[in-house]
Image: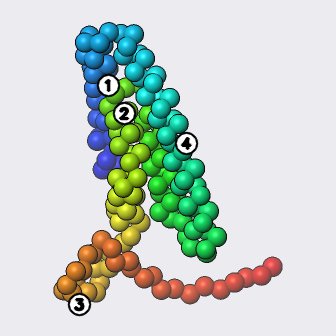
Amino acid sequence: MRGFPLVLLLFILAPIAEIWLMIDIGSVIGAGWTVLAIITTAIIGASLVRLQGIGVYSRLNQAASRGEIPAMEMIEGLFLLISGIFLLLPGFITDALGFLMLIPPLRRWLALNAVKHFFIVPNVTDPSAQNTPGHDPTIEATTIEGEYRRIDK
């Protein structure tokens, strides 16, 4: 519930900013050219998302065939999906964000930060590890020990 007011504010302010920018650009280049630009960016963006999605999908298959978990490829695919949604939404701000996510190094950086922020839990119980040079507490994962038993029916 912490981020709910921020998300609500984003859902209110983003369409207002998009409409304002479309009206502003439309007053300079004309309404027809503005609509054509929005449609063109959607078509170009969708084709770029498709091409890059094929590349990410092939890297995902290669990693899976090597026996690796294709986590980064899956997260990059998620960012490609978000990029495609942004590019299909009418507006110049969402198009700019969508095209930025189509840049592979930037998308890889976003994926790495998403992994660090959402999936890796820092180990704060080991005080000796925090004093080592080059220690990044956001990268170190916590090991959870436990027992299990298998019940066959």
Kindly check if marks 4 and 1 are in contact, taking CB atoms under 8 A apart as contact. Answer: no
Q: Earlier in the sequence, mark 4 or mark 1?
A: 1
Residue 70 horizontal side relative to residue 79, left or right: right
Kindly check if marks 1 and 2 are in contact, taking CB atoms under 8 A apart as contact. Answer: yes
Mark 4: amino acid: Arg
Location of mark 3 (residue): 128
Q: Earlier in the sequence, mark 4 or mark 3?
A: 4
Give how far apart the Cα atoms at labels 1 and 2 are.
8 Å
Location of mark 1 (residue): 18
Q: Quadrant of residue 130?
A: bottom left
Mark 3: amino acid: Ser
Give how far apart the Cα atoms at labels 4 and 3 are.
47 Å
Residue 29 horizontal side relative to residue 63, left or right: left
- x then y, percent, for residue 69: 55, 70
Residue at point 54%, 48% (across, down): 53
Q: Secondary structure at mark 2?
A: helix
Q: Earlier in the sequence, mark 2 or mark 4?
A: 4
Location of mark 4 (residue): 50
Mark 1: amino acid: Glu
- x then y, percent, for residue 56: 53, 55
Residue at point 35%, 10% (across, down): 31
Give how far apart the Cα atoms at labels 2 and 3 are.
45 Å
